[in-house]
Amino acid sequence: MTVRAIVLLAALFTGNAWAVDRWVAPPAPRVRDGTPIQPQAEIYADHRYIIHLPKPEGDWRQRRYLVYLERSDEQPFWATLETQIFEKDDEVVFITIPKGSQDKYQLEVVDRTSYPYTRVFKGNLGSIREIED
């Protein structure tokens, strides 16, 4: 009986030691609402969008924004998009969507220059102001 109790206790303590060694992923970065930006879009006839995201000139060498595109209707879709530096005070993201569906896509722009991250835009793709020629 005592041997059985000792084996049970040894197994119990060994199991806890193994549990401590397991890797646990860190929590995702928190996102809070911040000062909004005003993105602008170049819209082409074949439903291509070039969305311009303004940023301060001081950090022109680094990419500042994370961009998420989501569609949550009968055809759900979610993507993380990569921005490109366009000018000293501008980043761009390129999007092509089906004809007439711009109001079904939700665009979210997150500023990742400080922690917690800051949401600077969230709205429909159709609500973005078009750049006039």
Image (spheres, rainbow, N blue to C red):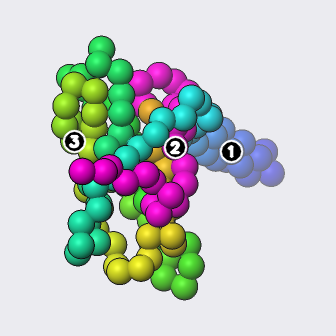
Residue 112, disc: none
Measured along the vertical axis of the image, is residue 39 above or below residue 63? below
Residue 84, disc: 3
Q: Is residue 11 magenta?
A: no
Label 3 SS: strand
Q: Look at mark 1 in the image and give the residue it sits on.
A: 12
Q: Look at mark 2 in the image and give the residue it sits on.
A: 121
Lateral position of residue 110 relative to residue 131, left or right = right
* Picture quadrant where residue 72 is located: bottom right
What amino acid does circle 2 point to?
Answer: Phe
Which mark sits nearer the N-terminus, 2 or 3? Answer: 3
Please give the name of the residue rendered at 21% of the width and 41% of the height, measured from the top-left corner.
Answer: 84
Which mark sits nearer the N-terminus, 1 or 3? Answer: 1
Q: Position of residue 106 (x, y in %)?
A: 51, 61
Q: Position of residue 90 (x, y in %)?
A: 28, 33
Q: CA distance from mark 1 to mark 3?
A: 54 Å
